[in-house]
Image: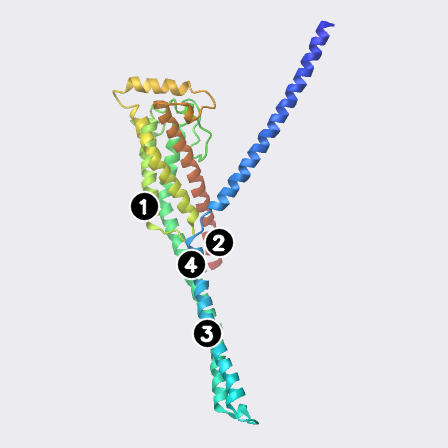
């Protein structure tokens, strides 16, 4: 009987634990959903409006202003015509035989014609200029991307080699990863990429990070991004994260320099002992520098994902336009 009672109590305890777990999972899902909705609202509220949008609004304001001036002139001449007919003509006179009537009427009709013609001309000129500027910006982006793309590929290869421990397969061109600080335990080992002979993983990563950062900087300086602000946002995120994180990258690389063997061994031991779920606020000293370095790597991954997505859309649009011209 005692064993049956114990089994019964254990079964009831398991059911209670299962219910608690289900309740906790539901609560967690609700919190995640709430956070996602909040983040979407923040993204929409902070979404950048392209400079071309402001140019369009400026063009429409100019068209409305010029058309308004002509419409006011039309109304003025119509009022003059009415006043002339009502107060300046003798009674019983046939105003359609008067030259003044036809003169005022022609002026009013000309104003209406100007409104229609000017509006159409402004709209067509703006559309042509807008499409031309958009195509020129896309061509400039594609031209710069031919330089940036190899830098991205070489950067990704070194980044993925850096965060992949020895003995595991390296996903050379994977953009976004789930790497954590413990995956950096072999970063002072020689790079597995043939062209990096004589360099450690961290040294090769550091070298190609600066190459990609320079390529993005040149692209950001040469293009206004009036029609593709998303690319500008992605590049600026990469550049900003590099600005803030480069000091940490330099420090982590210097830990592996000759003469720093003791410090290098100490930081590797700390990296291997980092428990799951550790946040940057929970660590200090040299280990906090490694956490900042890993944060920069993940921020770069998000920026490159956004950049490559927009580049792919531009390539698709360009290919469709070329197919139409054939």
Closer to the observer: label 2 or label 4? 4
Q: Earlier in the sequence, mark 2 or mark 1?
A: 1
The residue labelled by disc 1 is 218
Which quadrant of the figure has residue 306? top left
Relative side of 317 to 264, left or right? right
Closer to the observer: label 4 or label 1? 4
Q: Which of marks 4 and 3 is nearer the N terminus?
A: 4
Relative side of 258 to 129, left or right? left
The residue labelled by disc 2 is 320
- Is 27 above or below relative to 326? above
Mark-to-mark CA distance, 2 and 1:
28 Å
Residue, x 38% and y 43% (percent of image)? Answer: 236
The residue labelled by disc 4 is 55
Judged from the image, the secondary structure of the residue bearing numbered disc 2 is helix
Badge 3 crowding class, 10 Å Cα cut-off, few under 14, some 14 to 19, many 20 or more, is many
Judged from the image, the secondary structure of the residue bearing numbered disc 1 is helix
Badge 2 crowding class, 10 Å Cα cut-off, few under 14, some 14 to 19, many 20 or more, is few
Judged from the image, the secondary structure of the residue bearing numbered disc 3 is helix
- What x and y, as percent, mark residue 150? 36, 40
Q: Which of marks 3 and 1 is nearer the N terminus?
A: 3
Relative side of 216 to 50, left or right? left
Q: Nearer the viewer, residue 199 or 133?
A: 133
- Is 131 above or below relative to 119? above
Q: Which of marks 3 and 2 is nearer the N terminus?
A: 3
Count of numbered labels shown in the rendering = 4
Residue farthest toward the left in the current orientation of the protein: 259
Q: Which of 187 and 80 is in front in this view?
A: 80
Q: What is the number of the mark on residue 70?
A: 3
Closer to the observer: label 4 or label 3? 3
Relative side of 289 to 8, left or right? left
């Amino acid at each position: 009987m005692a064993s049956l009672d114990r089994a019964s109590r254990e079964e009831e305890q398991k059911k209670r634990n299962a219910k608690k777990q289900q309740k906790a999972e539901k609560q967690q899902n609700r919190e995640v959903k709430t956070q996602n909705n909040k983040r979407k609202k923040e993204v929409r509220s902070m979404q950048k409006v392209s400079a071309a949008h402001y140019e369009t609004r400026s063009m429409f304001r100019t068209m409305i202003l010029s058309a308004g001036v002509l419409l006011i002139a039309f109304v003025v001449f119509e009022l003059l015509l009415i006043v002339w007919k009502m107060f300046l003509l003798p009674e019983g006179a046939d105003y359609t035989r008067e030259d003044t009537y036809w003169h005022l009427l022609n002026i009013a009709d000309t104003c209406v014609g100007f409104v229609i013609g000017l509006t159409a001309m402004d709209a067509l000129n703006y559309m042509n200029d807008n499409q031309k500027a958009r195509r020129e910006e896309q061509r400039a982006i594609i031209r710069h991307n031919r330089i940036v793309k190899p830098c991205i590929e070489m950067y990704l290869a070194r980044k993925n080699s850096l965060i992949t421990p020895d003995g595991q397969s390296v996903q050379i061109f994977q953009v976004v990863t789930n790497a954590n600080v413990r995956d950096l335990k072999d970063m002072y080992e020689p790079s597995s990429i043939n062209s990096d002979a004589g360099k450690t993983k961290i040294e090769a990563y550091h070298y190609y990070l600066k190459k990609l950062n320079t390529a993005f900087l040149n692209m950001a300086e040469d293009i206004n991004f009036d029609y593709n602000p998303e690319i500008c946002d992605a590049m600026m995120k990469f550049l900003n994260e590099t600005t803030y994180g480069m000091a940490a990258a330099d420090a982590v690389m210097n830990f592996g320099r000759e003469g720093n063997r003791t410090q290098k061994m100490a930081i590797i031991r700390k990296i291997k002992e980092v428990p799951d779920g550790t946040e940057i606020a929970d660590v200090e000293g040299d280990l906090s520098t490694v956490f900042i370095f890993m944060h920069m790597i993940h921020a770069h991954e998000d920026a490159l994902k956004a950049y490559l997505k927009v580049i792919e859309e531009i390539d698709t649009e360009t290919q469709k336009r070329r197919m139409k011209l054939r």
